[in-house]
Amino acid sequence: MSQTGDILDVKLRGVVKRFGAFEAVAGIDLDVAPGQFVTLLGPSGCGKTTTLRIIGGLERADAGEVMVAGAPVDGDSRHTRMVFQSYALFPHMTVARNVAFGLRMNGLTKPEIETQVDAILASLGLADQAGKYPRQLSGGQQQRVALARALVTRPRVLLLDEPLGALDLKMRRRMQGELKALQRDVGITFIYVTHDQEEAMNLSDVIVVMEKGRIAQVGTPEEIYRRPASAYVADFVGETNLLPGNIAVRPENILLGPSLPAGIARGQGVVRSKAFLGAVTRIDIEMSDGAILVVNSPRALTVAAGDTIPFGWRDEDALILPADNSPRKETL
């Protein structure tokens, strides 16, 4: 949260962006205080990348106010830098020259450039890669070069558009840890775009869930997961069971077996599938109305497909949600 009198790193008011008849961003209000890792999360076409590009001055809003570091953006991106999924490195330049590019454009002297490039490469574990070309680097190394090139100019806000999308799962998880640590170290605001809920939960101080060009909910990862504001958010962020009447229960909160604790919701269904996933056993149960209840149990259960099994949950583990959420202004 920002303190009274602080200058927000990002301030959006009534921001609208249309592409022909399609309204990609439909009137967003958003405040981002300095030093946060904020993720714009949502499915393809929800407006998250367009919003990011508007903040970075790469797209011009059709209506509304866009402020970064207290100044109107309006095509001026001096307070922001963007890191793309494709990295967008110059193939004919070495790592050192790629990183130095922005500093040269800013008119720094050669000794100043060398000092700053050496420092940022060392901080990202790239000191021994300075003389190589992008084609000689792994995907993770190329990603770090792109980060170094963006950060060396010391922007107020770093914008990241699905920057880990081209990496394999193991490298993505490693880079998530590196990004999180890097953001803490440099202390600047990161605004990150992804459709990956797990990635958003792992990285973010604050998640902005988007739906059809609007903000569906803003909150910490725990708030978004445990207290979703709508059926859409509950369904999109992690796994959940949406039951008639818009009741939502997370799979890990469902209890199974004949000896259920007193005072919890009860029912029974037929086991349709069972899978051991290491930390949990996943069971799909068909209820009497034909709906499938997904259960993640930490216990090794001796049930099999076709068995009838009792299930239930505690009242405090179920949420009653509206089907839709009206647009709102959110302050981070």
Image: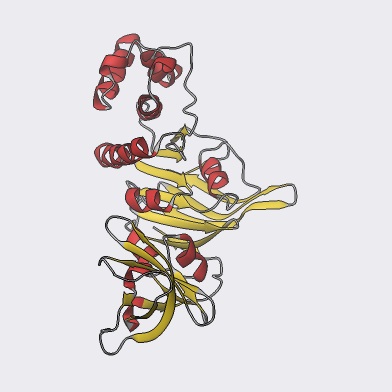
Say if residue 112 shows up in the picture.
Answer: no
Where does the image place residue 80, in percent across and percent down from the top left? 45, 36
Q: What is the count of numbered marks?
A: 0
Please give the name of the residue rendered at 40% of the width and 40% of the height, measured from the top-left corner.
157
Where does the image place residue 63, in percent across and percent down from the top left? 64, 51
- Pick the front one: 100 or 300: 300
- Toward the right, the furthest residue is 21
Tell me: 244 left or right of 224: right
Please give the name of the residue rendered at 33% of the width and 15% of the height, measured from the top-left corner.
113
Say if residue 288 shows up in the picture.
Answer: yes
Where does the image place residue 66, in percent across and percent down from the top left? 53, 47
- Quadrant assignment for the C terminus: bottom left
Please give the name of the residue rendered at 36% of the width and 43% of the height, measured from the top-left corner.
189
- Pick the front one: 322 or 70: 322
The colour scheme used here is secondary structure
- Toward the bottom, the furthest residue is 263
The part of the image, by quadrant, that contains residue 218 is bottom left
The part of the image, by quadrant, that contains residue 275 is bottom left
- Pick the front one: 236 or 258: 258
Please give the name of the residue rendered at 57% of the width and 40% of the height, measured from the top-left corner.
74
- Pick the front one: 115 or 2: 115
Image position of 100 with respect to 3: above or below: above
Where does the image place residue 220, in percent across and percent down from the top left? 35, 59
- Quadrant assignment for the N terminus: bottom left
